[in-house]
Each structure stands twice: as C-alpha cells, then as structure tokens.
Amino acid sequence: MPPRRRAAAPRQLPPLVSLLLCGLVSGLLAGCTAPASVPAPGDTARTARTAARDVRAAVAAWARQPPAQLAGIPLEGWAYEVTGVRRDGARATATAELRYRLAGHDTAAAGSAREVRLGLAGGQWRVTGDAPAPGAPPQLWDQGPVAVVRGAHSLVLGTGQDGPTLSAIAAEADRAVPVVNAAWPRPWAGRVVVLVPGSVDAMAALLGRPAAEYRGMAAVTTGSVGGGPAPADRIVVNPQGYAELTAEGRAVVLTHETTHVATRSATTATTPLWLSEGFADWAAYRGTDPAPERAAPALGRAVRAGRPPAQLPRNEDFAFGADPEALSRAYEGAWLACRLVARRWGDAALVDLYARAGREQLPAALREALGTDGAALTEAWRQALRADLGSGTPAAQGAGPRGAGP
C-alpha cells in the first residue's frame, strides 16, 4: 500500500497583503473588516463608577441651597443624600433622601424620598428635574407655589389659598397656643406648623392616604410619638372641611390639633386613643365647657335610643374612614370621659394620668393618678352619659368635624 500523503498546509498570505485584499473587497464582502475593539470588563466598571461619581457631584452642587421658589420658607440644613444612581445613555436618575429643617420649629431634620433627574450636555451632568420617589408622598411645594404666613406662635404654609385665608388660620393657631398652655402645663415648643393644601385630595397626597379617609376631617396632625428627636409636628388642614365650620368649630379644631402637638413627647404606643383624643377635645372645650347634649349630639342620640356604649372607645373606633356617626360617638365619648376625670379628680390629675399612660400600662396609670381602675372609671362614665345625655332635645349639630392625631 502506498504511503498515505499528508494534506498540504494552506498557504497563508503575508499580513500586509491580507489587509490590502480585505480593503479592496470590503464593499463586496460583508464582515471582512478588522475586529472591533471591545472594552475590558475593568474599563466598563471604571466608566460606570466615574459616571456615578459625576452624577453625585452634580446633585451636590445643585442642592447647595434650596430652589429660588422656596425662598420664603425658613429652610435650613437643606441637603440631598444620594443613595443610588441609574444611567441610561445621556440621562441619569439619582435616588436621594432630602433632609431639611424649618428654622425655629424643627429640632431634627425632616426626610423626604426623592428622585433627581439629570442630563449629560457638553460632557457635564446637569440636574433637569426633581420629584418624589415612586410611592413616597410629595412635599407641599410639589403641589404648587407656597405662600408663607408667620404668626406669633405659628408658621402657616399654603398652596392654592389666598392670603386672608392663611392669615386667619395663623391667627386661630396663635389663639390656640395659650389655651393649650393652660390645659397642658408641661414643657413643649409652644409653636405650631400648619400646612394648608389646595384640596382634600392634595391633603391626602401629602399624607400618603386615600382622600376618602379625610373627607369628614377638618384637620389632622402628623408626628412621631415619644420623646425622641423628631421634626416638629405638622397640622394639615382639609381646606374644604375647615371652611364649612363655624368660628367656634374652627377654634375647637385648631386647639385640638395644637394639643396633640403639645402632648406629643408624652404620647406613646401605650396611650389609649380615648385618652389622647379625649384630652385634646377637653383642652379645646375647657374654656367654654359646652353642654354635653350640644357638643356630643351623636352620642346623645344613641343614649336616648337606649343604646349607650358598654365600654370606653377602643383604639379601632377612631380609625380613619370609619362610619361618620360611629366616629363622632367615639370622639364625643372620649371627651366626656376626660371631662369626667377633670371634674371628679381635678385638672392636675387628668394631666398626670395622661403623662403616666405614656410611660406605663393604663391599669397602673389609673391606680397611681386617680386611685381607681378601668371598670370603676367605665361605670362612672356610663352613669355620667345617662345623666348628661339621657334627656333633652337633640342638638342640630355639634362644633363640626373634629381633627385627629396621627
């Protein structure tokens, strides 16, 4: 058998000839080009880090001071802390936490989750917009130009409201502070911040809740319970509900909410809502002490119909969005419970009960402040309801929609 011949190795053209031939036929044969340069993984990572660094620097430069349209608001400590950067070509989005304080009111920085949008132009990143982060509530200035009214004891910020309306709210808040000082003779800031959005829907957006929960409310108070460092509480007014109140009703609502601000550091998760809400109404009504049948019409109707409550209002009875009649009965019953405590044991004992209920369980607080227990207090309260509301002509209306705590 003849020996097997090895196949001849293909001849290779010199590199220069290969390149010349490729150039001559490049218009005819697709793909006959020199391979493109592919950046190494390390180069891509370095580019991303550089872009993120430049975006952070651009946000820091842009956020050195508040925007010009917020010049009337007494802001201090304004800063954006970038927590992440997403880039899409010549556009980028920085997630950030806005921190600021209202000078003269906040003892700690308020926070707001934001998204800052940037564009790349001329090799430089520039901020093109700023908005609440997805799912985060807006700030008042996100809803439009903010008007500012400074009172003796208040700071009122409003959007979509005229000057006289905001000035009237500031005057009412100023009147509320001394009333609250007399009812709560304990240390507190002695000043309030009131936000007045343009509508109940705008109010609900600020609070991050459905608007339906606030249609029966004239105002609410936001804030963290307990004595730790926190921004000042914000009283948020429902402009539609507030406008429907009588002058007396407006005074009651803002004094009620100011009481929540004053008692915030003494209020904790152990404080029952009947005591928190009832004390706020007691402080608001304390100077006038209206007749129960006039200030508690919903509860009066239930008592006269033979349906008096069997127990003090539960925390869930104060839930936002609850049946309006049931919610009114809860607030009215809470007020009458605190009124009973003040009348039988004294104003100082009621204040002491409130302070103790934020530090210890209610049975211990009742025993130490009043020398009684929950069952005895409930029975005394039910007897007072029958005595105060069991007869007489039902009132046409009370003081109007109440406010609420957090």
Image (tube, rainbow, N blue to C red):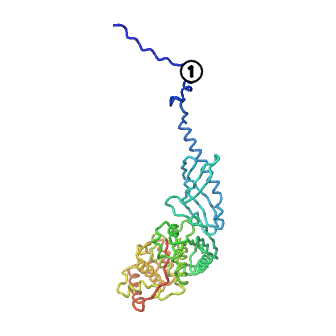
Of the pair 266 and 276, the residue shown nearer to us: 276
Marker count (numbered): 1
Residue occupying the far left of the picture: 1
Left or right side of 195 for 401: left
Of the pair 60 and 377, the residue shown nearer to us: 60
Q: Quadrant of residue 309?
A: bottom left
The residue sitting at 42% across, 14% down in the picture is: 7
Residue occupying the far top of the picture: 2
Left or right side of 29 for 192: right
Of the pair 255 and 346, the residue shown nearer to us: 255
Per the image, the residue denoted by label 1 is 17
Left or right side of 256 for 305: left
Of the pair 86 and 162, the residue shown nearer to us: 162
Name the secondary structure under disc 1: helix
The image shows residue 207, relative to residue 53, as above or below, that is below
The residue sitting at 50% across, 88% down in the picture is: 290
